[in-house]
């Protein structure tokens, strides 16, 4: 598959992310498929932000360990990342800020006196970002006719002056390299005329929450979940979502529990450390049977870990958080399309089963920008299902009435005749507190019976690849696409078909059903973005043999080309 | 009485919580609020054990956290009367961050603090409000620090209604609770509550000799400086409303809350939003 990977890097405040995202949107508007991955180290020296963009004429949902085109915005940025340049590469830079770059075998350097050129036209230095977009696109020989429209849309909110300055800078950048066409890169004309969205996992979660009728969101800011708060805070007022920034994670979930009890469709968002703090309330949701969705955008732990980097290390936490024994559901989508769809499902599941649902994203999924076909996303249709809510009460109301599936009717405050205690103490069917009592084992069983029924009703796993494949790469959550690409490479290399198996519904698992579906695989490779292979125990319990385990826990995701085969 | 629960209370005979519940029921009844329009949240401890001893839409929470679901309820259905019942240990220590944040934001809830100046359900340890040198099970040689001042801290944090009640005067307490319920914004009533089992210092007799009523003493509850001075009094113990001002509660500035958008759960279109991507 022909691809080109571009990295733009510079210190925080230089706008590496915004040029990257703008470049991605411009390429998308031309009809390319794109994938954007970003990093923002929290270091002082050498702490260079980057945005890495992979472009293709075919759908692309991950990136590579090296890049062909490099736009370093400072000398430090160049020095920090030069070792990741692909063998055949191109460095485009401002000679006035980066200086001279030594020539390398297979690499071409194009230094431009950007500041002087901007000054001559009276353009502010910040427009060098768009200047570089003009330069890189021209070197790649792309059709620039549509870019002005993209720029116009991108800068529209900043006023006409900014729009026209950036369009000028773009043209200036294009003109500055008009004789430097580089035909070493294989980027054919795009064929797709389908509309693609450029969307991150966090945006997809927030959008799905709005779609599914979510009405209350509370959160304490914590990277990498914070963009959900930003998106909902911005769009909440027009879409009926009440957003409340809490003073602690404990407050966030406690207030949301009350909102849910009062009748809202509620969600909270955090990262691993915040999830730890929410543990006591999650246990309380278990015994009170108050529905709630808790988003954990994972980052590197333990402790503060690497707060701006990715890891899939909270699976065991999500499955076990909270004292005592109670049912919960854990879902880990593989990309923004799944995040959009599954968050809607999660909100239904929380209300239908009256349990906490922990929704696991991670830095990589939450803050990477995928191309998603508009029609696919727009085609997701999930009916809002609020489960058992009694709007009119006749006779005695028992909030925790014993039930075959474990789910009783609830009434919303304000409903005449529906008085009850939602009780963190264990309780009888009315909700009144009990001590050691024959009712306790019955009530505990009533709650736990849900797990069996939930496990049976969840969609299970997804298998990608040929039906006759006897070998599979297994992954969960955001490692979906790296697993699919690894299976493709293994198929190519070994001449035998490999499939990819992706788990998104992590808990509860219906072992016998899943084991049956996976029984055809005699050889299983497992890839996880953590250091202990948290899914492995489940696979082994199902009698599956994991031949090789690939783990990565340096804070970055698996890249397409990363695992060395053979 | 429509608020009476069939469940027998488990408090000690003579416990101040009986008085608090009686005053609360009286206040709600006199204000004409039916039980299904009331949400009461309960903390952990003797006060929290009242969760099923009074009828309403009740939510027994976790230690120190009772006011959090109360806040959440009000965002979704501001028509409801929302009252949190909590002890001094829960409010002033375990949940102190929530207390400060709720007062700062003027969240529109009523908080009734059963302040018996001791941890009672856990059998007699020092509380944030225990008096200096008072010997408890956790400080058997005397509590080595001074009690927190809940009235002064509440005012400083931004509460717009701050009162102190006493279980030795149920009728007066009922009037304070009524005023707190009618107030729009964060209303806290710190209730000096006798604990017949674990606090042998701050008894009904102890307070009978010391209390006086602020309204009878000509205190102006809109005067913040005067309120602080009254809150700092040591020998005499003022009860009544220390501080009471009108300030916009968060709900009045939030149109979605006003129109109860939180209850409008239905599938939405995102076509307009998709244009951003």
Image: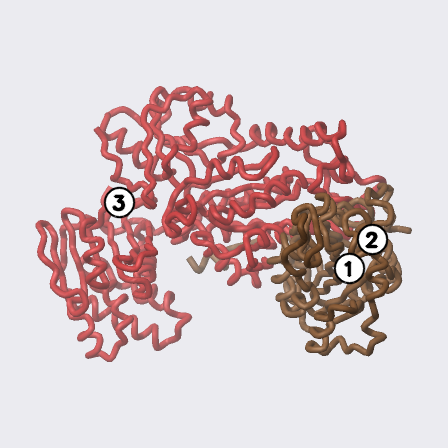
The residue located at (86%, 63%) in the rendering is B208
Q: Chain of mark 3?
A: A
| Residue farthest right in this picture | B1
**Most foreground residue, B103 or A31:** B103
Lateral position of residue B86 relative to residue A272, left or right: right
Image quadrant where one finds the C terminus of chain A: top left
Question: Which chain is assigned red?
Answer: A
Which quarter of the rendering shows the N terminus of chain A? top left
A430 is higher (above) or lower (below) than A212: above
- Ranked by sequence position, the earlier of labels 2 and 1 is 2
| Residues packed near mark 3 inside 10 Å, few (<14), some (14 to 19) or many (20 plus) | some
Of labels 3 and 1, the one closer to you: 1
- Coloration mode: by chain
Work out whether disc 3 and disc 1 sit on a shared chain.
Answer: no
Residue designated by label 2: B16
Q: Position of residue A117 (x, y in %)?
A: 18, 74
Q: Could you tell me which residue is drawn at 74 percent across and 57 percent down?
A: B113
Marks 2 and 1 close (CB-CB < 8 Å): yes
Left or right side of A132 for B65: right
Rendered position, A464 above or below B25: above
Relative horizontal placement of residue A111, taking residue A543 as reference (left or right): left
Q: Residue tagged by mark 1?
A: B191
Task: Kindly identify which numbered label has been placed on residue A64.
Answer: 3
Q: In which quarter of the view is residue A143 placed?
A: bottom left
Residue B266 visible (yes or no): no
Q: Secondary structure at mark 2?
A: helix
Look at chain B in the picture and name its colour.
Answer: brown
Residue B54 place in picture, x, y as percent:
82, 48
Circles 2 and 1 on the same subunit: yes
Residue B134 point in image, percent of width and height: 71, 54
Chain of the residue under label 2: B
**Disc 3 on helix, strand or loop?**
loop
């Amino acid at each position: 598959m022909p691809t080109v990977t571009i990295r733009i890097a510079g210190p925080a405040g230089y706008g590496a992310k915004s040029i990257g995202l703008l470049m991605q949107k411009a390429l998308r508007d031309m009809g390319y498929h794109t994938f954007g991955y970003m990093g923002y180290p929290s270091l002082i020296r050498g702490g260079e932000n980057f945005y890495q963009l992979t472009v293709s004429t075919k759908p692309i949902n991950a990136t590579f360990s090296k890049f062909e085109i490099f736009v370093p915005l400072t000398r430090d940025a160049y020095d920090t990342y030069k070792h990741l340049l692909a063998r055949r590469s191109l460095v485009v830079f401002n000679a006035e800020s980066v200086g001279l770059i030594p020539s390398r075998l297979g690499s071409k350097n194009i230094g431009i006196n950007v500041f002087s050129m901007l000054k001559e036209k009276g353009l502010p230095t910040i427009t060098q970002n768009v200047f570089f977009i003009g330069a890189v696109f021209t070197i790649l020989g792309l059709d620039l006719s549509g870019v002005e429209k993209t720029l116009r849309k991108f800068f529209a909110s900043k006023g006409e002056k900014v729009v026209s300055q950036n369009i000028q800078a773009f043209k200036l950048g294009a003109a500055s390299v008009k004789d430097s066409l580089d035909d070493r890169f294989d980027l054919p004309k795009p064929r797709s005329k389908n509309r693609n969205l450029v969307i991150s996992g966090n945006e997809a979660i927030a959008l799905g929450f709005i779609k599914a009728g979510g009405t209350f969101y509370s959160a304490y800011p914590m990277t990498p979940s914070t963009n959900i708060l930003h998106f909902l805070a911005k769009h909440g007022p027009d879409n009926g979502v009440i957003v409340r920034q809490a003073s602690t994670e404990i407050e966030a979930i406690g207030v949301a529990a009350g909102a849910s009890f009062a009748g809202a469709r509620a969600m909270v968002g955090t990262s691993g450390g915040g999830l730890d703090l929410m543990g006591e309330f999650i246990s309380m949701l278990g015994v009170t049977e108050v529905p709630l969705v808790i988003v954990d955008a994972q980052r590197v732990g333990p402790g503060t870990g690497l707060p701006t980097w990715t890891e899939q290390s909270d699976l065991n936490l999500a499955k076990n958080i909270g004292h005592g024994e109670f049912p919960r559901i854990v879902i880990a989508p593989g990309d923004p399309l799944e995040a959009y769809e599954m968050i809607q499902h999660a909100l239904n599941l929380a209300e239908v089963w009256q349990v906490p649902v922990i929704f696991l994203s991670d830095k990589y999924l939450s803050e990477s920008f995928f191309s998603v076909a508009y029609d696919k996303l727009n085609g997701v249709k999930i009916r809002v299902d609020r489960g058992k809510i009694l709007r009119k009460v006749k006779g005695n109301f028992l909030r925790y009435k014993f039930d075959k599936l474990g789910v009783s009717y609830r009434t919303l405050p304000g409903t005449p005749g529906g008085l009850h205690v939602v009780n963190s103490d264990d309780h009888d069917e009315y909700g009144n507190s009990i001590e050691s009592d024959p009712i306790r084992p019955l009530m505990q069983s009533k709650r736990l019976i849900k797990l069996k029924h939930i496990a049976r009703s969840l969609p299970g796993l997804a298998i990608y690849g040929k039906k006759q494949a006897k070998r599979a790469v297994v992954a969960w959550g955001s490692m979906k696409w790296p697993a699919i690409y690894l299976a493709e490479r293994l198929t190519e290399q070994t001449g035998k078909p490999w499939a990819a198996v992706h788990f998104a519904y992590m808990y509860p698992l219906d072992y016998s059903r899943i084991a049956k579906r996976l029984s055809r695989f005699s050889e299983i490779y497992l890839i996880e973005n953590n250091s202990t292979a948290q899914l492995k125990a489940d696979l082994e319990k199902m009698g599956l043999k994991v031949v090789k385990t690939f783990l990565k826990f340096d804070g970055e995701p698996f890249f397409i080309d990363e695992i060395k085969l053979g | 009485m429509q608020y009476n629960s069939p469940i027998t209370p488990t408090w000690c005979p003579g416990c101040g919580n009986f008085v608090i519940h009686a005053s609360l029921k009286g206040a709600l009844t006199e204000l004409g609020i039916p039980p299904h329009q009331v949400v009461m949240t309960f903390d952990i401890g003797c006060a929290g054990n009242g969760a099923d001893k009074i009828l309403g839409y009740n939510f027994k929470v976790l230690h120190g956290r009772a006011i959090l679901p109360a806040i959440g309820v009000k965002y979704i259905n501001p028509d409801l009367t929302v009252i949190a019942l909590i002890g001094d240990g829960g409010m002033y220590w375990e949940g102190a961050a929530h207390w400060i944040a709720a007062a700062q934001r003027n969240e529109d809830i009523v908080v009734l603090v059963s302040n018996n100046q001791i941890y009672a359900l856990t059998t007699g340890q020092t509380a944030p409000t225990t008096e200096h040198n008072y010997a408890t099970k956790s400080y058997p040689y005397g509590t080595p620090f001074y009690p927190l001042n809940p009235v002064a801290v509440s005012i400083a944090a931004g509460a717009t209604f701050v009162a102190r009640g006493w279980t030795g005067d149920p009728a007066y307490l009922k009037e304070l609770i009524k005023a707190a319920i009618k107030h729009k914004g964060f209303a806290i009533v710190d209730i000096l509550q006798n604990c017949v089992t674990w606090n042998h210092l701050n008894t009904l007799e102890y307070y009978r000799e010391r209390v006086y009523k602020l309204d009878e003493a000509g205190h102006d509850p809109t005067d913040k400086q005067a309120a602080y001075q009254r809150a700092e009094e040591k020998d005499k113990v003022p009860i009544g409303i220390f501080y009471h001002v009108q300030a916009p509660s968060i709900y009045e500035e939030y149109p979605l809350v006003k129109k109860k958008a939180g209850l409008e759960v239905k599938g939405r279109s995102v076509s307009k939003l998709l244009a951003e991507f």
